[in-house]
C-alpha cells in the first residue's frame, strides 16, 4: 500500500457500469417484463411502495445474511486483493431457492444458515433490497422536488436460462413480488454478444449450459462529514482496531478495520463473533485521530460457484440439481453464479473522480491510528449492519 500522505475526507466513486438496460434481448426473451409486482405491501414489504416497517423475522434475517456474508468473504479470500458484494449474493441465492426443490433447496437454505422459512426469507429480502435501493432515491427526490431522481445504490440481478425451457409462472410472480430480477430465456449457442452487452463483463455461456445467475452492486455517495478532520468514531478488539464513517445519501456506514497481527490470518478467522465485538466496542461519545491514505479498491466480477461449493452448495452445479419449482422439467444445472462488485475510489476528491491525497504531506497528529498496513474496508447497512460491500486494501 502506498505511503500515507494525509488525513482525508473521503468520497465513494463507482466505476462499474450497472446492468440496468437489457441490451440486445427481445421482449419475448425477457420473461419478467410481463409480470408485475403486487402493490400489497403487507405481502411484499416493498419500501418503494411505501412499506416502512420490516418483517417480524427481520432480526433473524440479519443474523443469517451477516453470517453468510462473512463466510463468503473468508472462503473467497486467497491472499490477493478482493472485493465482494455479499448481500447481493445472499439475495440472489434466495431467488434461486424459490426455483429449487428437494435437496437443492435445502442446500441453499443451509448454506445461508437460514433461521427462517423461505416465504419469510422472501419478504425480508424484498424489504432489505428495496430499502437499500430507495432510501437515497427518495431523499434526493424530496430535496430536488423531482420524482424521477436516480438511484444512488442498486442491487441488480438477472437469471439467464437456455432456450426451450418452460419457466413456471409462479416462479416469475415470486421474482416480481420480492426480487425484481430480469429473467431472460434465450439460445445460449447464439447469444454471446447479447450476454456481454447485458452484463458489461465477460461471461461466456455455451450451448451445453442451462442456467447462469448474475448480480451486481453499484452505488455512489459522499461522506456525511466531509471535513478534513481526522477525528472519527472508533472501534477496537484484542485483534483489530478501526474507524467508522457515514455516507450522506445511502443508509450505509463505512468500516475501516486494521488487524493488529497477520492480515491473512485475521481475514480467514473474521467471523460474526469478531464482527459483533467490533460493533459493540463503538462509543459515539469518543473520537479517535486516524490517518488513512486515499485508495482504490479492485472491481471484481467473480464466478463464485467454487466458493459456494466450498460452503455447502454441492448439487446446484451438477447433474443432481433439482430446479423443479423454476421449470416444469426441472432439468437445469446452475453453470455460473457471478457476482460483480464495483471499484471504489476513496479519497477527498469526491464522487466521480480519482481519489487524491491532500497536500499536507506527512502530518500525523499525536496518538493517531495510522492505517499504513493492509486493512478491510466495508460498507454496511446502518439499520442491520449487514455487509453490503467488503474489500481488502493491501
Image: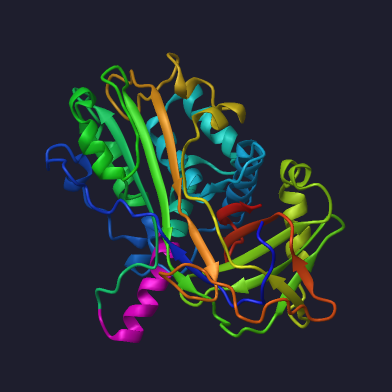
Q: Is residue 178 left or right of residue 291?
A: left
Q: Is residue 120 magenta?
A: no
Q: Residue furthest top?
A: 319
Relative height, residue 174 to residue 369 (above, below) = above
What residue lies at 57% left-to-right and 32% top-to-bottom?
307
Relative height, residue 362 to residue 214 (above, below) = below
Tell me which colouring the rendered structure shows.
Answer: rainbow
Residue 57 seen in the current view: no
The foreground one among 373 and 64 is 373
- Residue 346, by quadrant, is bottom right
Q: Position of residue 202 (x, y in %)?
A: 34, 37
Q: Main secondary structure of the magenta part?
A: helix
Residue 139 seen in the current view: yes
What residue lies at 29% left-to-right and 48% top-to-bottom?
176
- Residue 6, by quadrant, is bottom right
Which portion, as a residue range, is magenta? 130-146
The foreground one among 206 and 275 is 206
What residue lies at 31% left-to-right and 60% top-to-bottom?
40
Q: Position of residue 172 (x, y in %)?
A: 27, 40
Q: Position of residue 155 (x, y in %)?
A: 40, 54
Q: Position of residue 246 (x, y in %)?
A: 58, 74
Relative height, residue 264 to residue 351 (above, below) = above
What residue lies at 74% left-to-right and 43% top-to-bottom?
264
The quadrant of the rendering that contains the N terminus is: bottom right
The foreground one among 285 and 239 is 239
> How many numbered badges does the structure rendering display?
0
Amino acid at each position: 500500500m502506498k505511503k500515507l500522505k494525509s488525513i482525508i475526507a473521503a468520497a465513494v466513486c463507482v466505476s462499474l457500469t450497472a446492468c440496468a438496460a437489457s441490451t440486445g434481448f427481445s421482449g419475448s426473451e425477457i420473461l419478467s417484463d410481463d409480470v408485475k409486482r403486487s402493490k400489497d405491501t403487507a405481502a411484499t414489504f416493498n419500501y418503494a411502495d411505501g412499506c416502512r416497517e420490516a418483517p417480524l423475522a427481520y432480526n433473524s434475517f440479519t443474523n443469517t445474511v451477516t453470517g453468510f456474508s462473512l463466510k463468503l468473504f473468508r472462503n473467497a479470500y486467497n491472499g490477493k486483493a478482493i472485493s465482494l458484494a455479499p448481500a447481493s449474493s445472499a439475495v440472489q441465492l434466495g431467488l434461486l431457492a424459490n426455483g429449487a426443490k428437494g435437496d437443492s433447496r435445502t442446500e441453499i437454505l443451509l448454506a445461508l444458515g437460514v433461521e427462517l422459512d423461505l416465504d419469510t426469507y422472501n419478504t425480508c429480502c424484498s424489504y432489505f433490497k428495496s430499502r437499500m435501493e430507495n432510501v437515497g432515491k427518495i431523499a434526493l427526490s424530496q430535496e430536488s422536488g423531482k420524482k424521477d431522481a436516480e438511484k444512488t445504490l442498486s442491487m441488480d440481478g438477472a437469471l439467464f436460462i437456455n432456450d426451450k425451457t418452460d419457466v413456471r409462472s409462479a416462479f416469475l410472480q415470486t421474482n416480481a413480488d420480492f426480487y425484481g430480477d430480469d429473467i431472460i430465456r434465450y439460445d445460449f449457442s447464439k447469444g454471446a454478444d447479447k450476454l456481454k452487452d447485458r452484463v458489461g463483463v465477460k461471461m461466456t455461456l455455451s450451448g451445453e449450459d442451462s442456467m447462469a445467475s448474475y448480480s451486481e452492486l453499484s452505488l455512489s455517495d459522499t461522506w456525511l462529514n466531509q471535513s478534513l478532520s481526522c477525528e472519527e468514531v472508533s472501534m477496537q478488539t484484542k485483534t483489530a482496531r478501526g474507524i467508522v464513517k457515514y455516507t450522506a445519501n445511502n443508509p450505509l456506514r463505512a468500516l475501516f478495520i486494521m488487524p493488529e497481527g497477520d492480515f491473512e490470518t485475521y481475514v480467514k478467522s473474521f467471523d460474526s463473533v469478531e464482527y459483533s465485538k467490533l460493533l459493540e466496542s463503538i462509543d459515539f461519545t469518543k473520537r479517535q485521530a486516524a490517518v488513512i491514505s486515499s485508495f482504490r479498491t479492485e472491481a471484481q466480477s467473480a464466478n463464485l460457484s467454487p466458493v459456494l461449493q466450498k460452503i455447502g452448495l454441492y448439487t446446484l452445479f451438477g447433474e443432481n440439481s433439482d430446479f423443479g419449482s423454476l421449470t416444469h422439467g426441472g432439468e437445469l444445472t446452475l453453470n455460473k453464479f457471478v457476482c460483480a462488485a464495483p471499484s471504489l475510489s476513496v479519497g477527498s476528491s469526491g464522487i466521480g473522480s480519482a481519489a487524491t491525497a491532500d497536500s499536507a504531506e506527512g502530518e500525523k497528529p499525536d496518538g493517531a491510528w495510522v492505517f499504513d498496513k493492509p486493512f478491510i474496508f466495508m460498507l454496511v447497512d446502518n439499520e442491520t449492519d449487514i455487509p453490503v460491500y467488503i474489500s481488502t486494501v493491501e
